[in-house]
Amino acid sequence: MTTEQLVKEIQKKKSFLCIGLDVDLNKIPQQLLEEEDPIFAFNKAIIDATHHLCVAYKPNTAFYEAYGLKGWKSLEKTIQYLNEYYPEIFTIADAKRGDIGNTSTMYAKAFFEDLAFDSVTVAPYMGKDSVEPFLAFKDKHTIMLALTSNAGAFDFQTLSVNNTELYKQVLETSKTWNHSENLMYVVGATKAEYLADIRNIIPDSFLLVPGVGAQGGNLQDVCKYGMNDTVGLLINSSRGIIYASNNADFAEVAAQKAKELQLEMEAELNAYFK
Amino acid sequence: MTTEQLVKEIQKKKSFLCIGLDVDLNKIPQQLLEEEDPIFAFNKAIIDATHHLCVAYKPNTAFYEAYGLKGWKSLEKTIQYLNEYYPEIFTIADAKRGDIGNTSTMYAKAFFEDLAFDSVTVAPYMGKDSVEPFLAFKDKHTIMLALTSNAGAFDFQTLSVNNTELYKQVLETSKTWNHSENLMYVVGATKAEYLADIRNIIPDSFLLVPGVGAQGGNLQDVCKYGMNDTVGLLINSSRGIIYASNNADFAEVAAQKAKELQLEMEAELNAYFK
């Protein structure tokens, strides 16, 4: 999917919501455990109920790998279902991969070719040759960690380097890489005030913003500092939507929660693009 | 496996060799492609031929994920084979994972419980709460990236922070984390001269050292600066061993290459522990 297609979809749906499919068998409605593939059954119900309210889904690979082969099968079925029935949806493999060059190429093949995701998240610590193999794929997007939403973000990401902070240096350096036009960045909503500085460095890039809702981030602040003329934001919510109810009505309640966020986003879009 | 058991095995075999099982179907002997599971067939042959010469095997997960469900199945069969037939071997899932707390817990379960590896590699960028969930597992080991063997290591890892370099700060900070006794570190052999400084910060920790052989690192230099009183080193070789031949004799030639390295290691051990 091209960035232009993503932006068009955002303007059409008046939503830049990404729904995180972080499926924990201990948290889903227990009647689903009788299904042959409870994880896929859960995802399918959530997707069918919410696809018109969001523009992206983001399965975090950890939640699938934890269930071994069965989990990987559920991930495969989920992405295949999305690509078959909702090809207009932007898909994100939240995998946070990164390795030396030839190994990163294997990861890129895994997520872009074998599973056919539109994008994958990567970690920056190993530098240029660990990320460029992902960037080489046409119309695929590589979403690199910049400033994350967890407490540990302050351990290293905000350390002072070269009269700036590490995460800003990561942003600056990444702009020089081959096919950097295929980069997006993870910036946590819990640190919305940092977004103004971030936008000075990467005015045009899309940002994937986790941490709204369960982790305490504020949608209005993120939009105030982060929105640009092509919207430039994908705001993720996982637990706040998919676990809003664990009764038989879970998909319906998830859709209500997604609708609430979509309406907030619509207001922000109307204000910005008036 | 405890560190003591690993050290005992090293002294018994006179080897601290780790063999990287980075299996690329384009590089293995083509007659194996007729097998039902060519990746596992290759691994099994390599393991059976080399297990007495090494103390650890390290499958890199990228090479398995690239083949989707089939690849994950091959990984599962490989670790099950190792745990069943060679339980004295230290197993490393080279996965370079790391995510926010509850997600890292899922990765830890995937590799420590579901697949039953002894250890997993992790990336430090997201800080304390992204690594501590791995450290909480008893007699399991978390091998964190410090200074990697690729060119991109100089993009961020060696930047100046707090009057030191980022990778040294990563080492220092990680010592303060809960259950830091379960940490080991990745330090590339291509930067052996850095090992003296690293040993000042973490004198007792085990180091997993990639980059000997194909990537140009030197075994003697690594031992000179990196060996400690419990050996403290696992030196990895992947391509230099497993792809030494791609004919029918591949396992035999791999064993010859492993034997060469084991003999070099025996000489280093004899010199240090004389």
Image (cartoon, coloured by chain):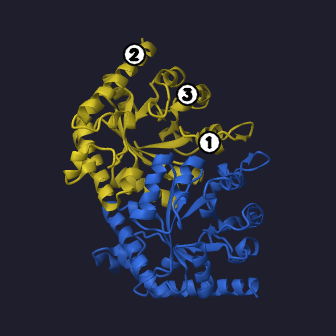
Chain colours: A blue, B yellow
- Is the residue A168 above or below the residue A37 in the image? above
- Residue B274 placement, left or right of B187: left
Chain identifier of the residue bearing label 3 in the image: B
- Is the residue A205 above or below the residue B270 in the image? below
Task: Name the spot of residue B119 as percent of width and height, x first.
Answer: 41, 44
Task: Name the spot of residue A173 as percent of width and height, x first.
Answer: 68, 51
Residue of label 3 = B192
> What's under tag 3, amino acid-wise?
Ala
Residue of label 1 = B170
Residue of label 2 = B267
Asked whether residue A29 appears in the rendered view, the answer is: no
- Residue A93 placement, left or right of A227: left
- Between B191 and A161, the residue placed more toward the observer is B191
- Between A70 and B243, the residue placed more toward the observer is B243
Asked if badges 2 and 1 are on one and the same chain, I answer: yes
Give the mark toward the camera: 3 or 1.
3
Label 2, label 1: how far apart the Cα atoms are: 32 Å
Of mark 2 and mark 3, the one earlier in the sequence is: 3
- Residue A112 placement, left or right of B39: right
